[in-house]
Image: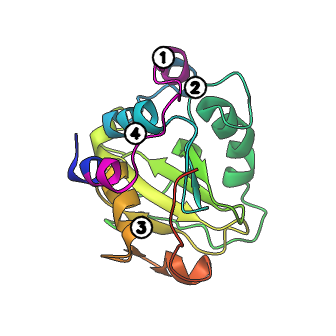
Amino acid sequence: MTDGLDELMTMFAPPAGRDRDVVWADTENRLGRLVPEDYKQLVAAFGLATFCDQIDLFQPHSNARIDLASVTAENIEFLTDDTSGDDRPTQTPDGQPFDSALVIQWSASASGGYWLWYPDPSAPLDPTKYSIVFTPADQGDWWFFEGPTTDFIYKYVTGIEPPEGQYGNVHDTLDGPPVCGVV
């Protein structure tokens, strides 16, 4: 477990009665990439949870609206549309070319924003090297974060270290720090 996952488990007791037997093989096959282990552990513990009204956990599911692979496939066209006039980055913070076709959508915000993973172009199949990316529904800004997904979620929900990305503060886009709980 990561420190973030340990802290989230302490802050929010995992709900009783959630389906914790999650099979990831089909989802990873459909994505063509692996899902980070800490995220799998988070989903196993919390199931279909929403953190702070802003982070819905997508996962393998028969409902396409919450199925991680289905949501990614559905939104990839919009996320890669070069005619949208957005400010999509041309490179990652470390100077690598940015290819939005590589993103995996692992969550959506209540305001329609996208929580994404972006693989390291030098190791696209290594989920320990994924960056976390957030872009609002209009894709006007793109923020990059390094580190495990659960560490990011913990920092986000506590505000201990407000996640500041390459282009500013996500909390500003989401109308301030979150009011937290898990549903």
The residue range painted magenta reads 7-28
Distance of label 3 from label 1 (alpha carbons): 27 Å
Query: Residue 170, image x and y in percent?
Result: 51, 75
Q: Which residue does the numbered mark 2 point to in the structure image?
A: 60
Distance of label 2 from label 1 (alpha carbons): 7 Å
The kind of secondary structure element at disc 2 is loop
Q: Which residue does the numbered mark 3 point to in the structure image?
A: 156
Distance of label 4 from label 1 (alpha carbons): 13 Å
Q: Which residue does the numbered mark 4 point to in the structure image?
A: 42
Distance of label 2 from label 4 (alpha carbons): 13 Å
Proximity of marks 2 and 1: CB atoms separated by less than 8 Å = yes
Residue 90 higher or lower than 2, as above or below = below
Earlier along the polypeptide chain: callout 3 or callout 2?
2
Can residue 179 be seen here? The reply is: yes
Proximity of marks 2 and 4: CB atoms separated by less than 8 Å = no
Query: Residue 27, image x and y in percent?
Result: 54, 22
Task: Tell me the amino acid under the disc marked 2.
Answer: Pro
Proximity of marks 4 and 1: CB atoms separated by less than 8 Å = no
The kind of secondary structure element at disc 4 is helix
